[in-house]
Image: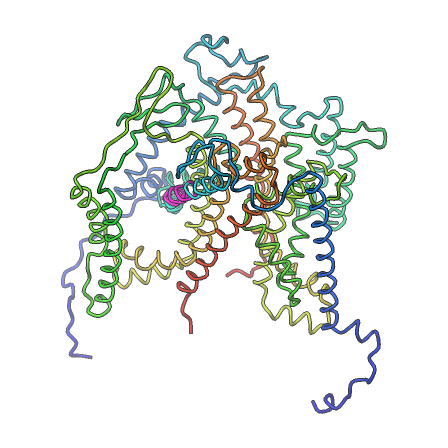
Amino acid sequence: MTDHAVTAPPAGRTLASYIYDPKFRGLFFQALTLAIVLIVGWWIFDNTTENLRRANTASGYGFLSGRAGFDIGQTLIPYTSDSTYGRAILVGFLNTLLVAFLGIITATIIGFIIGIGRLSHNWLIAKLCTVYVEIFRNIPVLLIIFFWYKGVLGALPQVRESLELPFSSYLNNRGLAFPKPIWGDGAILIPIALVIGIVAALAIARWAKARQAATGQQFRTVSTGLALIVGLPVLAFFLAGMPLTFDYPVAGRFNLTGGGNIAPEFVALYLALSFYTASFIAETIRAGIKGVPKGQSEAAGALGLQPSKITRLVVVPQALRIIIPPLTSQYLNLTKNSSLGVAVGFPELVSTGGTTMNQTGQAVEVVSIWLVVYLSISIATSLFMNWFNAKMALVER
Amino acid sequence: MSTQEIGFVRADLLPPRPAPQRSGSAIGWIRANLLATPMDVVLTVLAVALLLWSVPGMLSWLFFEAVWSGENREACLTMAQGGVQPDSWNGACWAFVGDRFQQFMFGRYPIEERWRPILVTVMFIGLLAPILTPRLPYKGWNALALFVVFPILAFFLLHGGTFGLERVETPLWGGLMVTLILSFVGIAVSLPVGILLALGRKSDLPVIRLFCVTFIEVIRGVPLITVLFMANVMLPLFLPTGWTIDNFLRALVGVALFASAYMAEVVRGGLQAIPKGQYEGADSLGLSYWQKIRLIIMPQALKLVIPGIVNTFIGLFKDTSLVSIIGMFDLLGIVRLNFTDTDWITPVTPITGLIFAGFIFWLFCFGMSRYSAFMESHLETGHKR
C-alpha cells in the first residue's frame, strides 16, 4: 500500500491525463449535454414565439375566461355554452375522473373473476377465461370502443321505437333514459349519515383488531361495519321523511323529455375500458396468486386452517403484495386510456381541451394543461404506491 | 413432557374408502376436471349454458348467415331496406370486406403502383424470417440488412420520386401498410433509444440522469393521444417559419418517442436485475464503459426482459391505431372511413369491418406473444430453479 501512496502525482498534467480522467470526462459530457439541450431549447422557444407572433396568437392563459360557445352533452356541474373555456375544461376533467372511477371498479370486478377463473380446477371455466384474456389483450382498446359504439349501441332502435325497460326506463340509440332522482329538503342528512357510518365502521374495526391482538376474542367486524355503512343512511332517509321524488322520462312524439340520460358515448367508453383493462387485471391477479409459494397454503393446511381461511388469511395477503403495484399501473393506464373518449365524442379532458384548442388556437397552453393534469394524476398515484409499498414490504432482518 | 394431556386419540379404524376413479378414461377426466365438487357442477352447467346460448348464434352470424359475395350494399340489406336479403336476415357482410380488401391493406395507394408495397412486404418477410429463427447463422449481417438497409430501400420504394419511380405522397398511404410501417419504425427506434435512456437513468452523471428521468416520466405520465396531438400541433410550431413537416412523420415522431420511454423502463428493469458483481467483474477486467455494457451487461439484461420488450412491441402495435384520431388512415382508420361510404352503407357493415380489423390486430399481437413465449424457453439457460 505504502509503495503506491508515496508516488507523487506529476506536477503538470498532460492533455492525455485529462482525457482519461473519468471525473473530468463526466463533467465534460454533462456540460456538452447541457449545452446541446439549452441550445435546442432556445432554438425551439425562439421559433415558437416567432411562429406565434406571425399567427397573431396571444400567449398566456387569459383565454380560459373567454366564452366557450360550445355545448357539452354530459356534465357533472352546471354548464352552458355561455360558460368559460376554463369551466369547459373543468367539465372535461370531471368526466375523465367519472369514467375512470367507474371503469376501475368494473374492470377490477371482472378482472378478479376472470383471473381467479383461469386458476380454477374446472377445465371449462379455465379455458373460457383464457379465451377472454387472449381476445381482449390482443385487440386495440380504440377498436373495442368503436365496437361497442358502432356495433352494439349503434344497432339499438331509433328514439321513436325505444325499448321500454322496467322502472320507466327507455333504451335507444341516443342512450339510456331513466327516472332522475330529485332530492328534497333534509336529504343532506343521508351523506352525513354515510360518513358517520364509515367512520364508525373503521373505528370498530380498529378496536376489534386491538382486542383480538390482546385477548384473542374475535368480533364480527365485516357484518357490523356493513350494517353501519348501509343502515345509517337508510335510517337517515326515513328520519328525513323520504325526501325523494323521481323525474320520469316521458315518451313524446319525436323525443323523450325529462329524466336523466346516459349517453351511448359514455357507455361505449366505459364498457370498452372495463373489458380491456379487465383482461390485464386478470393476468395480474393470476400472476399474484401463482406467485405465493405452494408451501404457504400447505403449511396453513397443516396448521388446521379451513380452505376459506387459508385463502383469506395466508394466500391473499401475500398475493396482494405482488398484485398491488402492477394493478395500480393498470388503473393508471385505464385513466390515461379514457382520453380515447375523444374518438367517439365523449366530452372528457382531451375532447373539451381539443375543442378549445381548435377554437382559440392556444395549442401550447392547452397541451400544457393536459400535461399538468395527467402528470399530477400519475405523480399522486406513484406517491401513494411508494407509501403503500413501504407499508406492505416484507419486514426482513 | 410425559404428563402432557393428549386431547384426542382415535381409537377405532376409519372405514375403508372406495377405490379411486380411473383417471385415464374420458369419464374419469370429466369427473376430475368438470364435476369435481357441487360448485364445479354448477359452474360447468352455467358455462355450458353460456356457450350454447352464444356460440351457435355467433357462428351463424359470422359464417352461415353471412354474405360472402356481392357488388354493393344491396347484397347486405334486407328487402325492407332495399336489398335482396329476406326481412329477418341478420349476418356478417364479408362481401364488404372482400370488396375493400385491397383498400384495407394499402389505403389509397395508386393501384398500378401497389407492386411496390407488396415487394417491400416480401423483402421484409424474407429478412424477418431468418432473424426470428434461432438456428440460422449470420444474425449480425441479417440485423444490419433488416434495420439499416431495408428501411432505406423501403423508403425509396414506397415514397418514390427517384429511380424513375412515381412519387406517392404519404397522405395516400393507408391501411395495414401504415400500421406496419408505424410499428416497425417505432420498434426499430424505440429499442436503441430506450436502451440509451435506461443507461442514462442509471448513469452516475447527475445532469444526464435528470434529463433521462424527466423525459421518461413525462412521456409515461401522459396518454399517447396527447403525445400525438403534441407532435401534430406543436412540432410545426417548434420549427422555423416556412419549414413544413409531413403529417406521417409527425405521427412517427410521436409514436417513437412514446415507445422509447416505455422501452427505457423495461430495459431498466433488466439492468437492475444484473448483480453488481457483473459490473465489478467487467471493471476489473479493464473493459471500458461501452465494452462493459455491450459485452457483459446488455446480453444478460436484454435476455431477462424479452417478455417485457415483446409486451411493449404488442402495446405499440395496438397503440398505432390511435393515429386514426389525428386524421391518418391506418387499418382502423380506413375501416372507419368506409362506414360512411355510400356504396356499402348498411346496418351490419360497421361491425363486420371492426371484426375484420380486430382479427388482423389479434393475429399479429397473438403471434408476437406466442413467439416471445417460444424465445423465452429457447434462451432459458438454467438460471431459474
Q: Nearer the viewer, residue B79 or B138?
A: B79
Q: Residue at x 50, y 44 (%)?
A: A336
Quarter of the C terminus of chain A within the rendering: bottom left
Q: Residue at x 34, y 32 (%)?
A: B48
State the predominant SS element of the stretch in magenta: helix
Left-right relation of B64 to B245: left
Question: Is residue A110 located in the magenta-colored stretch of the structure?
Answer: yes
Left-right relation of B265 to A293: right
Q: x, y percentage for residue A307?
A: 28, 54
Question: Is residue A292 located in the magenta-colored stretch of the structure?
Answer: no
Q: Residue at x 65, y 42 (%)?
A: B234
* Residue A137 visible within the image: no
Q: x, y percentage for residue B153?
A: 78, 38
What colouring method underlies this structural image? rainbow
Quarter of the N terminus of chain A within the rendering: bottom right
Range of residues picked out in magenta: A99-111
